[in-house]
Image (cartoon, grey):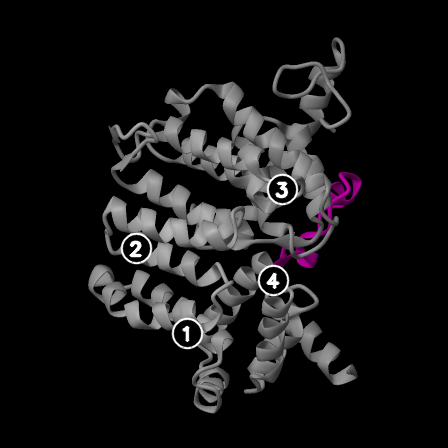
Amino acid sequence: MVDTMASLRAFLRATRAERNTPPSPRLATAGLPADDEVLLDAPDARLGPALVAAGRGEYGPAADLLAATRATADWENRDRYVVRLAAFAHSRAEWFTSWRAAAPHDPDALLVAAELAVARAWESPARAELLHQTGPLVESAAAGDPRDPVPWRIALDRARGSDAGHDEFERLWGEAVRRSPHHYGCHVAALQYLSSGPFRTSGGRASGGRGSHRECLDFAEWAAQDAPPGALVQALPLRAAFACLTEGDGRAVVDRTRLDAAADTAIALSATLPAAAPGPAELRNLLTYVLIALNRWQDALLQLRLTGPYASSFPWDRFSDDPLGRFLEAREEIRRNAPAARCAACAGHPRSEHGGRAHSGDH
């Protein structure tokens, strides 16, 4: 156990950027950790030991981890772990090659293999052709456990990248939601499909691609409202808001109040999740970006405090080859602007940063 924890600490330290800038005391006064304490894409307590073991060439802990998520129907974490394990196998394949050789029909190994194959195909200039070739592997993963929605999320990603028609995507979507009506990853895949090409609204009307931000936000808001309390899919409007703020003319065609409402829904979800934990880091990093774009500096500072020392590559890697550096720059920008936002609010009645009277969920 001691050796494993020492290896995990070394693994975490390896995710830190080498920086010569001394930590700013102003960060401490803002309730934020120093720059050199921030970790990029740090694994949680369950995934960390599996990655450390994989680094030693051992697949057993990864196999046990995924088997446990399948046994408990923990589909959200299963999806997140599969993505991380596939990414690790992409750079260090020995442990995964051994796993496939030892258990060629293991549903968990098949799932990682499908994610890895689709992710690799997405990176290639010959993406559509390579994604077409991954079909049998994705089908094998789906057959591994008929209850599992994660292979269908992979199938949706594959269909999107291979320019599948609407009927095919709708068929895959039906398979996904039949297994897990509120699975976040499947909803994100559907949202990305809607925002990246022609689709039809519920009335059957053909609609454009990236100009259809309103329709994407409609879908996201409907999914969030239909979800049970605390479900991660409640963050789907935030993903749609991010697309509106960063793609095409989304900011111009979508009413600001809908973007603020998406952020408010995500703030409420964030408040239910553990503070300073790796699991919710991507949600809070994305929420922080959207709050910056909406000039809601005090709300962004609160999310940074809840995030603690955990940065995630997404969304910062969309704008920089150094996502950790971009995250740290965003922290400094928030630290500079949050006091000004607070002083402006103090001039009259306390108000939330999106223009309404403040309430207990605002700060």
Q: Is residue 262 left or right of residue 305?
A: left
Residue 19 is at least partly visible in this image:
no
Q: Nearer the viewer, mark 2 or mark 4?
A: 4
Per the rendering, the mark at residue 159 is: 2
Residue carrying label 3: 331
In the image, what residue occupies the spot 71% across and 14% down? 357
Q: Of circles 1 and 3, which is in front?
A: 1
Whether tag 4 and tag 3 are in contact, CB under 8 A, the answer is: no
- Note whether 311 is above or below 13 in the view shown: above
Amino acid type at image mark 3: Arg
Closest to the observer, 52 or 264: 264
Please state which amino acid type lies under the numbered disc 1. Ala
* Mark 2 Cα-neighbour bin, 10 Å: few <14, some 14–19, many ≥20: many
| First in sequence: mark 1 vs mark 4 | 4
The image position of residue 66, as x and y in percent, is 58, 72
Q: CA distance from mark 2 to mark 3?
A: 37 Å
Magenta-tinted stretch: 19-41
Relative to 53, 160 lies left or right: left
The mark lying in front, picked from 2 and 3, is: 2
**Which amino acid does the dot numbered 2 rest on?**
Ala
In the picture provided, is 60 more to the left or to the right than 109? right
- The residue sitting at 73% across, 28% down in the picture is 361
Residues at badges 1 and 2 in contact (C-beta under 8 Å)? Answer: no
Of marks 1 and 3, which one's residue comes earlier in the chain? 1
Q: Could you say which disc has been placed on residue 113 in the image?
A: 1
Q: Residue at x 35, y 31 (%)?
A: 202
Q: Is residue 37 magenta?
A: yes
